[in-house]
Image (cartoon, rainbow, N blue to C red):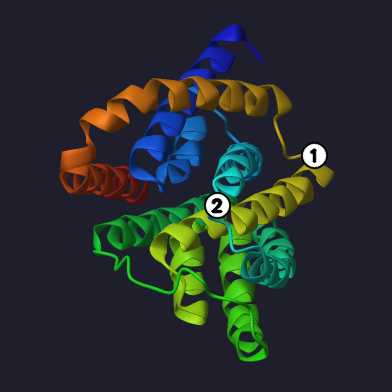
Amino acid sequence: MGWDALLLAGLGGALIGLLLTLFGGGGSVLATPWLIYVVGVIDTHAAIGTSAAAVAVNAAIGLSAQARAGRVKWPCAVTFGIAGLAGSLIGAQFAKQVDGEALLMWFAFAMIAIAISMLIPKKSEGDPNVHLTPPMVLKLAPVGLLAGLAAGFFGIGGGFLIAPGLMASTGMTLANASASSLVSVTLFGSATSLSYAASGQLLWPLFGALVVGGGVGTLAAIPLAKRLEKRTALARTIFALMVIAVALFILLK
């Protein structure tokens, strides 16, 4: 693997880290197309496994910051995450049995779904003091399982499913749901990438480049985020349309 591939992967990681920091989600879905169409990874499964590993690391870093800020509702987040962990392993195992070209087509449809979810306005109201109850567990477990299946199959963080699922199941606020979703994103990404790594389908040098680049992109986004505060809705719309454009490129290629 040449330095040019590592450099391109690092550049992609920086772009993804920048977008994740600016828009609070969705950026990780670009990792797999970037590895395939820009870096030149031929194996779709290896690209998905590698991007899933990078997503897990970035989510863990974000989780650490959110935990220090006290925004993570741990009982609810862990219940959701454990339920989805089995789903992510099943999803990853199933994805490895699917032909690479077909899997890429399904991935493109997932990208469109994620972009649409970004365009839908989200309510910020909710209970900031929510506590886990037995009835909540019965709601969290099946939703977590389904989110884990999707995350494992597509090798994505699944935040676009996890945060709304947490809000619907517990009534927590959007801020708490976004922070708590990082528990599941970390668990799902780790499980998915370990499954691919066990099959020899994780490209470690590219993974390292994505993570390093992601850190650089996150740092670069901090000053930009302040400038975009009043134009967040417009910026998210532009980003969502860009994701749809990439998905259509994959489908029509």
CA gap between label 2 and label 1 equals: 21 Å
Q: Residue at x 39, y 73 (%)?
A: 126
Residue 186, image x, y percentages: 65, 50
What amino acid is found at the position of numbered circle 1 in the picture?
Gly
Residue 131 in the figure: left or right of residue 197: left
Q: Residue at x 69, y 72 (%)?
A: 79
Q: Is residue 216 visible?
A: yes
Front position in the image: 229 or 3: 229
The reply to whether residue 44 is visible in this rendering is no
Numbered disc total: 2
Q: Amino acid at mark 2?
A: Gly
Residue 157: give its label.
Answer: 2
Indicate whether 229 appears above or below 132.
Answer: above
Q: Quadrant of residue 202?
A: top right
> Quadrant of the rendered structure where residue 98 is?
bottom right
Q: Quick check: 9 left or right of 45? A: left
Secondary structure beneath label 1: loop
- Mark seen at residue 200: 1
The quadrant of the image that shows the C terminus is top left
**Crowding at label 2, few (<14), some or many (≥20) Cα neighbours within 10 Å?**
many
Image location (x, y in percent) of residue 145: 64, 74
Residue 84 in the image: above or below residue 253 = below
- Return the disc, 2 or 1, that comes first in the chain's sequence: 2
99, 61: nearer the viewer: 61
Q: Which mark's residue is nearer the viewer, 2 or 1?
A: 2
Residues at badges 2 and 1 in contact (C-beta under 8 Å)?
no
Q: Horizontal placement of 196 versus 22: left or right? A: right
Q: Position of residue 118 (x, y in %)?
A: 30, 56
User: Residue 1: image x %, image y %?
Assistant: 66, 15
